[in-house]
Each structure stands twice: as structure tokens, then as C-alpha cells.
Image (tube, rainbow, N blue to C red):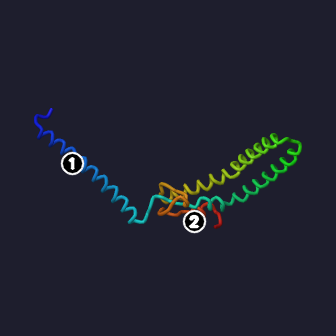
Amino acid sequence: MFKDKKQVKFVALAVALVFLLGVAAVAVTQTTTGMAAAAGGSSNIGVVNHQLLVSQHPDMAKAQEAMQAEVDQARKDFESKAATMNDKEKQDYYLQLQQRLSLKQQELVGPVFDKVNAAIKAVADAKGLVVVLDKSQVIYGGQDITDEVMKKIGAAK
């Protein structure tokens, strides 16, 4: 293919040079993009205090009341039926009640999570945020949108 070793060395050197220039160009573009984002102060990453938003949502109090009523009813059911059961039956019935309570909690709290997440998405879209993380998972950076989401869901802080 190549007639002499000098030509092979030249082609190998040219390929290596093109490769190194490509790597350097990628490094420079990535570094300047990161520095521009940091210098501009604006970020396309948002952070929220999700736990606060869920706990302060207006529907959460109703969900907690309904859940407490369900727990009280399960306790009464267990106490009334457990008197005539052996230990194995009590354990099985207890596990059945636990499963029922878990499903009830998902049924009651799920819609609150959905509403909070929809409000987060609406605020993030309006601000042009690409990613929103929970504040507890972020050490540094990100635009905190908790207050805007709180206003959106109408919860008092």
C-alpha cells in the first residue's frame, strides 16, 4: 500500500495529529460551555424541597386524616378478630391488614404526589429547566424553585 517507511510514518503522524486536535477541540468546547454556564449564573437544573411541597399541599391533610381513620379501623378489626385466632392466623391477618393499609396509603397520597410533580413540571417548563432534582440530593448549584412551586399549588409555607 505505502511504498516506503517514511510515507507510513508521515501518515501515522498525520492521523495522530488529527486525533489529538479533535480531542483538544472537544475539551475546549466542553470547558468553555461549562464556564459560560457558571459565569452566567443561570442553570438549566432546578432543585426543590419535594418533601416540604408534599407535606404542605392542601390535599395532604385530608389524605392524612383518611389514612388515620383507615389505621384506626384496621386496629379495631384486628383486635376483634384476633381474639379467636391462633398465632399463625394472627400473623397472617396482620400481614393482610398491613398490605391493605399500604395500598390505601398509595391510593390517598399518590394523587398529592402527582399534583406536586405536575406543578414542578409546569414551573420548570416556564423557567426553561431541563432537570429538577430534590434539594436533599444536591450539594451545590441548581436554581431553587420550591417557592414558585409552592405558589403554584396554593399551599401556605
Q: Are marks 2 and 1 in contact (CB under 8 Å)?
A: no
- Residue 95 or 27: which is nearer the viewer? 95
Q: Residues within 10 Å of mark 2 (few under 14, many from 20)?
A: some
**What residue do we see at 63% from left, 53% from top?**
113
Q: Quadrant of residue 88?
A: top right
* Residue under the point 33% across and 59% down: 32
Secondary structure at numbered mark 2: helix
Q: Earlier in the sequence, mark 2 or mark 1?
A: 1
122 versus 77 height, above or below: below
Amino acid at pointer 2: Asp
55 vs 3, left or right, is right
Q: Pick whichever, 143 or 68, lies toward us.
A: 68
For the N terminus, give its image quadrant.
top left
Q: Give the residue at the far top of this rendering.
A: 1
Residue lying farthest bottom? 157
Q: Nearer the viewer, residue 46 or 74?
A: 74
Name the amino acid, label 1.
Answer: Leu
Observer-nearest of 1 and 31: 1
In the visual, does 60 lie left or right of 122?
Answer: right
Residue 92 point in image, percent of width and height: 78, 41
- Discs 2/1, front: 1
Residue 156 falls left or right of residue 30: right
> Where does residue 154 sit, x and y in percent of width and height?
64, 63
39 is higher (above) or lower (below) than 116: below
Locate residue 130, reporting x and y percent: 47, 54
Q: Position of residue 117 (x, y in %)?
A: 59, 54
Q: Which mark is residue 147?
A: 2
Q: Is residue 16 left or right of residue 90?
A: left
User: Which numbered circle lies on residue 17?
Assistant: 1
Q: Quadrant of the C terminus?
A: bottom right
- Measure how far apart labels 2 and 1 are at the Cα level: 52 Å
State whether residue 44 is above or below residue 98: below
